[in-house]
Image (cartoon, rainbow, N blue to C red):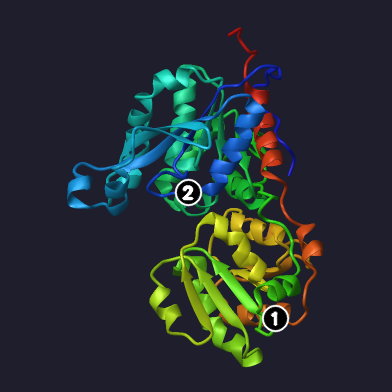
Amino acid sequence: MQHIVPRRRGPWHDGPVRIVAIARVFPNRLEPLEGPFNRQQFAALSAHAGEPVQVLHAVPWFPFASLTGVPERAALLAGLPDTDTVDGMPVTTLRHGYLPRVGMRVALPLFDRALARHDALLERADAILGSWAFPDGCAAVRAAKRLKKPCVVKMHGSDVNVVAKHPVAAQAIRDELAHADAIVVMAKSLATALVDLGVPASRMAFVPNGIDGARFFPRALDEVNAEEGTGTAGPVVLFIGRLEPQKGLGDLLDAWPHVLQAIPSATLRLVGKGPLKERASCMHGVEVLGARTHDAIPGELHRASLFVLPSWAEGMPNVVLEALACGRPVVGTAVGGIPDALANDTAGTVVAPHDARALAQAIVARLGIGFNAWEIAAFGPPSWDESGRQLFDVLARVCPAPTRR
């Protein structure tokens, strides 16, 4: 995939570039584990822009949710402060109306109205970055057009692979994103899906997510086992994510008895929470660890012999990139950006989604061949600094000439 040919090209900035990012997937005081990839990429982007990115954190709002407790997430996030600071970046809470049942039909006008209340903040921006296709990215494009600002929209995965399946969202994406100055994708499959929707390919730029190399780095498994006194234990297969069918966990649990038939000493460790917790807890050779902080993930990966993510739909899952950076082979499904990440056989194996038997065979095969952590890490992602630099390059190219400040 070629890098972008921007719709409107301006000179490079020598001084600071003011960027306002509109993001629904972003950590906050009540959901500290939400969207760590956006936090890390925006922090790196801030360094290249020369001043902190201003984040408009989009959260759903529903009348009396804090009193009634429904909708559940709107009730939880009603307690967020109006302003906050995350990693040195100023964060303003953007509360947009949300109607449960008819939400998709009215999502864009409700988001437009909520975003308009922050026009004064958007007016001070050199560029607007919308993160998530619908309604956030579409509303960002409309606001940028109204305020005569350049706008870049960054895709995630589920916004294209799931949300865009709804005809209302698909039509809005087709109509509005054609007016974005640039569209950033983290996987080639997302670009293909957007082109199929009618979004111009000439607007797109590929910017991969990154990893924190100070935390995610290769370690030999025998070194880790010796350090923790677990050298005699069998192989560990690791899953990290929501414990729900859409992540393919049901398929993995169906596959697990077949894995144990071939490798009785194997253990499946599940990091996360969700509706399949009870089923998993009752199975032989399965350990349910619950949710873990992002700081704990490198240790879990280092203890594993294999990472598995059998999702039904994905963008470019950062946990796969983190597994590769730690030098762990991956078995994943042929969805989203997973085949891109596992294009080399050394890095891992790709199977069809919904196929428990093929999944079991792939797990057994990978556990049987061993691995070299440093060879696998060579196929891992760039640093967050490099990811932030590439995103800044896209934004800077569509900015107008800098004004004297």
**10 Å neighbourhood of mark 1: few (<14), some, or many (≥20)?**
few
Q: What residue sits right under mark 2 in the picture?
A: 164
Q: Position of residue 284 (x, y in %)?
A: 50, 87
* Mark sitting earlier along the chain (2/1): 2
Residue 299 falls in image quadrant:
bottom right
The answer to whether residue 32 is above or below residue 270 is above
Q: Secondary structure at mark 2?
A: helix
Q: Residue at x 60, y 31 (%)?
A: 46
Q: Position of residue 127 (x, y in %)?
A: 56, 24
Q: Residue at x 33, y 40 (%)?
A: 80
Residue 58 falls in image quadrant:
top left
Left or right placement of residue 250 versus residue 351 in this view: left
Q: Looking at this view, is 275 or 333 the one in front?
A: 275
Left or right placement of residue 226 versus residue 67 in this view: right
Real-space CA distance between mark 2 and mark 1, rounded to the nearest whole angstrom: 47 Å
**10 Å neighbourhood of mark 2: few (<14), some, or many (≥20)?**
many
Q: Amino acid at mark 1?
A: Gly
Q: What residue sits right under mark 1 in the picture?
A: 231
Left or right placement of residue 128 versus residue 50 in this view: left
Q: Secondary structure at mark 1?
A: loop
The answer to whether residue 80 is above or below residue 361 is above
**Is label 2 or label 1 in front?**
1
Q: Is residue 333 visible?
A: no
Q: Position of residue 136 (x, y in %)?
A: 44, 37
- Say which mark, if any, is on residue 325: none
**Image quadrant for the N terminus?**
top right
Q: Position of residue 195 (x, y in %)?
A: 61, 44
Q: Amino acid at mark 2?
A: Ala
